[in-house]
Structure formats: C-alpha cells, structure tokens
Image (cartoon, helix red, strand yellow):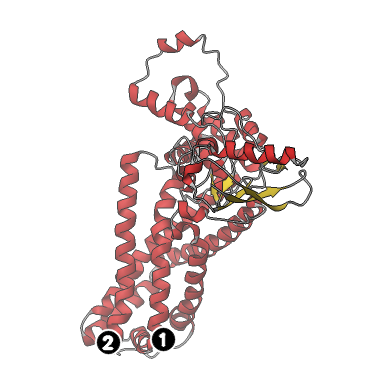
Amino acid sequence: MKSATHQRKLWMAGTGLFLCFFLVIHLLGNIQLLLPGEEAKQQFNWYSHLLAGNIIIEVIAYVLYASIIGHVVYALVVTRKNKLASGKKYKYDRRSSASTWQSRNMGLLGTIIFAFLVIHFKDFWYQYKFTTLPLDEKGNKDLYTVVVAAYKEWWYVVMYEVAMIALGFHLLHGFFSAGRTLGVYHPKYIRWVKVAGWAYTGIITIGFMLIPVYVHFTKA
Amino acid sequence: MKLYLKIWRQEDRTSYGKLADYTLDNVSEHMSFLEMLDMLNEALVEKGERVVEFDHDCREGICGQCGVMINGRAHGPLSNTTTCQLHMRSFKDGDTIYIEPFRATAFPIIRDLKIDRTSFDRIIAAGGFISASTGQAPEANSIPINHETAEAAFDSAACIGCGACVATCKNSSAALFTSAKVAHLALLPQGKEEARTRVKSMMNQMDSEGFGHCTNTEACEVECPQEISVLNIARMNYEYNKSRILEK
C-alpha cells in the first residue's frame, strides 16, 4: 500500500538532491577556469580527462542522466495530476499572496533550466564525448578552448546568467522542500535545513554566475 | 456602506455556474461577513428570488462549517481567520467583493457557495481514530504525557476541517488536513500503536479522493483559521517514510 502522491514527491526529492550533489562536483570543476592563463587550460583539461576516464564517475554519470530524466518525467506527471485535482479555476484569484513566488513557479523555473541543459549538453557534453577535439600540450582533449570560445559571446553569457538565476530560485525552494518531503520535522533540524539551503543556493548560484562573466572579461 | 457583490451562483452539482452581481446598501461595518450575506438573502427573499446558499453553523470560528473564497483568498483578506470571524470593517464603502466557493475536484459544489467536504470525512474514517478502548476521560490522565507533547498534540488536534488549506493550495492538496490528524495521534501513547498503518491508510484515502501533491508552498498555514503548522506535513512525511522502511 503506497501513497502515490507522496511516492512521486519522494522521487522528486531524491533525484533533486542527487542533482544538488552533482552541482557541487560541477562547480568544483568550473572553479579551475578562474586560474591564471595557461594554468587554467591545463588544469581544466586535466580535470575533464580525469572525470571522463573514471569508472566511478561513469556510474555517477548514468545516475545523473537518469536523475535528470526522472526529475523531469515526475514533474510532468505531478503537474498533470495537480491540474486534475484543482478542477475549475477561481474567477478572481489572489491566493498567491500567501506563498513565495518560487514555490508556485517551480515548473516554470524547471522548464528554463531544462531548456538551458539541452543547449549546455549540446555545446559541451556532446562536443567532448562524440566529436574529436584537438589535444592540448599534455595530450588531453582541449575542452577549455571550447568553453572560452562560448563565453566570448555576450549573448551566451547572458543566457547562462538567466538560467543560473532560474536555477537559484529553483534551488531555494527545492532544497528545503526536499527536506520536508523526506520528513525533517523537528524545528531545530528544519532551521538547519533552511540555513543549509540558503548557503548552498548562494554558493552554487553565485559560483556558477561569476565564472562566465570572469572568463568573458579576462580571457575571451 | 455600499457594496458591490459578485457571487458564484450554481443550481446544482452538474449545472454550469456563473458570477451574479448584487448591490447591497447600508451595510454596517460591525456586521460579520455572514451577517452581510444574511442581509443580502433577506433582500432576495423579499424580492421572491432564491437565496444564496452557504454553509455555516456556530458562527464563533470553531466549527469549520463556513468557508468561502473572498476576493480570491480563502476566508477573506485576513490570515488565520474563519469567514464568520471576518467583519465588514475589513472592507471599504464602494468595494467590489468576489465571493466564490472553495474549489477542488475533491470538493464538488452542491449549490452556490456550498461544497461537499465528505472527502475529509472519508480520510478520517480511513484511520483518524484509535481502535483500542482507552476508557473514560479521567483514565486518560493515568498515562503520563509530558507537557510539550500534550501541547503539540493539542495544537494539531485543533484543526476544524474547514478546507481552507485545500482551497488555497495551488495543487488542491489535503496534506495539511491529513497531517494534522496523523501528527496529533502519532504524538500520543494511545495513538502510537497504530501510527504506521494509520498514516498509510489516511494518505491513500487522501490520494483516492483526488487531492493533489503537496509542493510545500506553505500557503495552507497562512490561511488556516487554527494556525495548524506545516510542520505537521513534515511529521506526516516522516511517519509515512518510517512506516515504509519498517514495512515487512
């Protein structure tokens, strides 16, 4: 006997938290772009190669693909069921005054993030995995040059920043909401989850937003 | 004061409803919202029209019978209040007030502003009780319960089942209502025995009634007349997850 609604929310929370964990690994990689000149190139390409050739990372990558697809599919199912549950719309609706904007717009924010992910995968992931990139001096695939070339375009940076703002709002609600779904109910621990959520969101969002701007103005 | 009312009129469950316009003069600011509707209904009776039907009982804010959407918010513009405890001093002369029934697929409209909330009764019937005989009221005192736990259980038990949580939820989730009962009984020694089966049956019933998912927007707590905390939802999720993990 399972509660279907809660079961779906558990999947959303589980996949969401895994994606949160992945963002940390991703940010650690991107931070290397902030290194000075040639060092950034070698370090970044070395890191990319390290991840690409690692069996543990390979397994994590498949969990990652599954998590992205699972998170999106469950979101679609949940949204559809919620529409059915809501029934007829109110003629005059001011319910929004009782909750935060991001908590009501997770679907919209998620759609922006997903659209960004499609472009992101095409531009970097696909390039690295399925095309023959030139090698750098150390013999690693030169992903660094691809990244810098992308960040050279101002519109690319703007798109990136918009997506990261959407990600920030998504995380702000998502992180805490996942804690709730997992059943963190004691006020003391809830406070910790909230503070951890804010800190995590702040670091991830600012971190990811800073890098393309820095690269655009200093390296490209 | 003079008010312009836009009230949802619907003949029965199946018919198509719409907003109807009424103008009401000489409304006193000391009237409760329901007294204002009584005044309108008197005028309608005098004109030989069918009155606007709405639910109400105690008019003291404790029975949970009244409850309508007023200007797009459950129980009106004030937070944590019932419709009967809302007074006309919250409105101004010349205001237009939209009055609609609480809407959710699991709350079908019976007529006008009256809705069918028996889905809540079926959730309670699915597990919101204690099977073992716990004796007469004085015997409850023979089981020591610390003050904080007793207070927390009583806070959860305060839910009056008005349905504002569902009405204000963008997903029409009944998580706050269901969790209040789950948490109330899970906290007390008499209720703990069946906690694992209770949470599952009540949440299953909640799903089969057609309520939506809880997205933790926390709007329910803002509108709840009894200020039932959203932490009850967290507690319910905890109880549910625990019951699934410990399940044989």
Residue at 63%, 28% (x, y): give it. Answer: B125
Chain under disc 1: A
Residue at 58%, 37% (x, y): give it. Answer: B34
Using a 10 Å C-alpha cutoff, classify the residue at mark 2 as few (fewer than 14 neighbours), some (14 to 19) or many (20 or more): few
**Amino acid type, residue under disc 2 in the picture:** Phe
**Image quarter of the C terminus of chain B:** top right
Q: Are marks 2 and 1 on the same chain?
A: yes
Residue at 63%, 47% (x, y): give it. Answer: B103
Using a 10 Å C-alpha cutoff, classify the residue at mark 1 as few (fewer than 14 neighbours), some (14 to 19) or many (20 or more): few
A35 left or right, relative to A209: left
| Residue A94 vertical position relative to residue B208 in the rendered view, above or below | below
Residue in the foreground of this view, choosing between A149 and A64: A149
Tell me, for residue B128, which label it has, or none.
none
Residue in the foreground of this view, choosing between A11 and A130: A11
| Residue B206 vertical position relative to residue B154 in the rendered view, above or below | below
**Amino acid type, residue under disc 1 in the picture:** Trp
Question: Count of labels shown?
Answer: 2
Chain under disc 2: A
- Measured as percent of width and height from the top left, residue A213 is found at 30, 81
- Measured as percent of width and height from the top left, residue A219 is found at 27, 88
- Measured as percent of width and height from the top left, residue B247 is found at 53, 34
Q: Which callout, 2 or 1, points at the residue further toward the start of the chain?
A: 1
A220 left or right, relative to A14: left
**Residue linked to disc 1:** A155
Answer yes or no: is residue A141 visible.
no
**Residue linked to disc 2:** A217
B99 left or right, relative to A204: right
Mark 2–mark 1 Cα distance, whole angstroms, equals 13 Å
| Residue A102 vertical position relative to residue B26 in the rendered view, above or below | below
